[in-house]
Amino acid sequence: MGEGRAPNKTTENDGDVEAFLAAVRHPVRRRDARAMLDLMTRVTGQPARMWGTSLVGFGRYHYAYSSGREGDMGAAGFSPRAAAMTVYFADGFDEHGELLGRLGLHSLGKACLYLKDLDDVDLAVLEELVRRSYTRITSEQPFGLRLS
């Protein structure tokens, strides 16, 4: 990290994943968070860890931006936000178009997949999306994100 840069807020910590998930207020998000925990544990083979106060991550990768900012992040992760389940894809979505077409109801951000209800998506497709992304990120070390 360069001089004068603020430290990354989303860092791996010893937060209690189970307590975090149990405290999710929205019943669909809480149910879906349990399903995402199981799915990502199975796909990654890694234990769930808290990253910051609201992101559950699995494994890790090192990123570097063209601006010089760099750090570590979970190689797969999710956060049960109020509006939707947010699933993080550090590799973006360019390589996942065909699977996204078969996923079901969702919306996309730059590196986030938003799901309002896992009952509205094909869980086998979601699992394959997570598997491909996780494999790509963990096999291309360091995974350099070229963002400004």
Image (tube, rainbow, N blue to C red):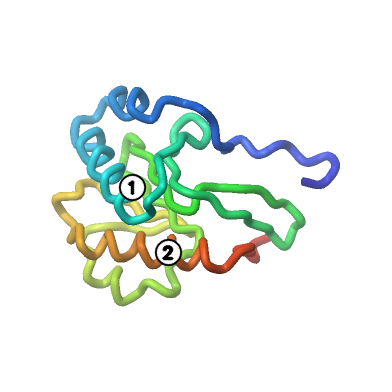
Disc sitting over residue 41 in the figure: 1
Q: Nearer the viewer, residue 84 or 3?
A: 3
Q: Badge 2, how many Cα within 10 Å: few under 14, some, many 20+?
A: many
Amino acid type at mark 2: Ser
Camera-near label (1 vs 2) is: 1
Please indicate whether residue 68 sits to the left or right of residue 145 in the image.
Answer: right
Residue lying at 38% horizontally and 45% vertically, measured from the top left? 78
> In 3D space, how far apart are the residues under numbered discs 1 and 2 (Cα atoms)?
14 Å
Label 2, secondary structure: give it.
Answer: helix
- Residue 144: quarter of image: bottom right
Disc sitting over residue 133 in the figure: 2
Q: Is residue 54 above or below residue 104?
A: above
Residue farthest to the left, as pictured? 119
Q: Total marks drawn? A: 2
- Residue 7: quarter of image: top right
> Which quadrant: the C terminus?
bottom right
Please indicate whether residue 29 sits to the left or right of residue 19 in the image.
Answer: left
Residue lying at 61% horizontally and 64% vertically, measured from the top left? 141
Q: Nearer the viewer, residue 76 or 146?
A: 76
- Residue 147: quarter of image: bottom right
Disc sitting over residue 76 in the figure: none
Q: Horizontal and vertical percent for residue 104?
A: 20, 62
Residue lying at 50% horizontally and 58% vertically, measured from the top left? 90
Amino acid type at mark 1: Thr
Work out whether mark 1 precedes mark 2 in sequence or the reverse, and give the earlier one. 1
Label 1, secondary structure: give it.
Answer: helix
Q: Horizontal and vertical percent for residue 1?
A: 77, 46
Q: Horizontal and vertical percent for residue 65?
A: 68, 59
Q: Horizontal and vertical percent for residue 135?
A: 44, 65
